[in-house]
Amino acid sequence: MSGKVAVITGGGTGIGAATAQELAKTGTKVVVVGRRPEPLQEVSETISQMGGVAVAHPTDITDFSAMQNLAETTIERFGQIDLVVANAAVHDASSIHDGDPHWWHKVIDVNVVGLLFTVRAFLPYMYKQEFGHLLIVSSLSGRVTYVGEPIYVTSKHAQVAFVECLRKEVTPKGIKVTIIEPGLVETPFIDNPMGQKIKETVTPLDPLDVANAVRFAFEQPKNCTIYEISMRPIKQLL
């Protein structure tokens, strides 16, 4: 994939960082995006040491003007955008009865509105160049319901619905769409009682497992789209 350009939100840690490094191995130039500059810089320096090309771009995905600036800056620097990995997300493990409504607002703002803003910022450029790939890292929580993470589950179901609408709108224009739905992954998201309980019987996926799925979807031939990948650790039943 030498010469390709990818933008990865939530690129400073976990799945995003692993994806950035995995794509860089293929010769893809990567723009790593997130709110905190330090992790982004660490990832970009690691990629540079590998001989790859990476740019750290601190950006709040819930700020549409900032996302428009990110898209414009990427095009100005690299001339094209081949892949956008919408990976940024926040988590909530509260109950409906005693959860924090202010944090719920944050969850919806990042996981849903942030995704919408990410796609909206980059899609006009993909239409103009007549190619591109929008890849959304969602969750199996967007396909099932259960007690313990109701607002997170709500946000992920919204993502799944949006991506299906997106696929129907943009694929006639030649734009690829992929949604990846991992189960339990070894990230700070599972540092809660529910995640730790599942870990008693399940070995979580590594972030690199998801990164490999991203690379697989991205490397398909021009006329082939991998639309949906659901992946679980073995023994995870939920």
Image: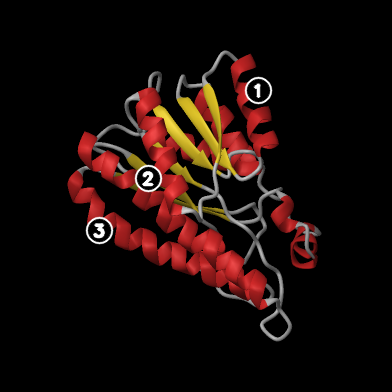
Q: Residue at x 61, y 42 (%)?
A: 15
According to the image, label 1 marks what residue? 46
Q: Residue at x 70, y 35 (%)?
A: 38
Q: Say whether residue 139 is left or right of residue 123.
A: right
Helix, strand or loop at mark 3: helix
Q: Amino acid at mark 2?
A: Leu
Q: Earlier in the sequence, mark 1 or mark 3?
A: 1
Figure colour scheme:
secondary structure
Mark seen at residue 59: none
According to the image, label 2 marks what residue? 134
Contact (Cβ within 8 Å) of mark 2 with mark 1: no
Residue 43 shows up from this direction: yes
Q: Say whether residue 10 is left or right of residue 63.
A: right
User: Residue 194 occupies which quadrant of the picture?
Assistant: bottom right
Indicate the quadrant containing the C terminus: top left, top right, bottom left or bottom right.
Answer: bottom right
Indicate the quadrant containing the N terminus: top left, top right, bottom left or bottom right.
Answer: top left
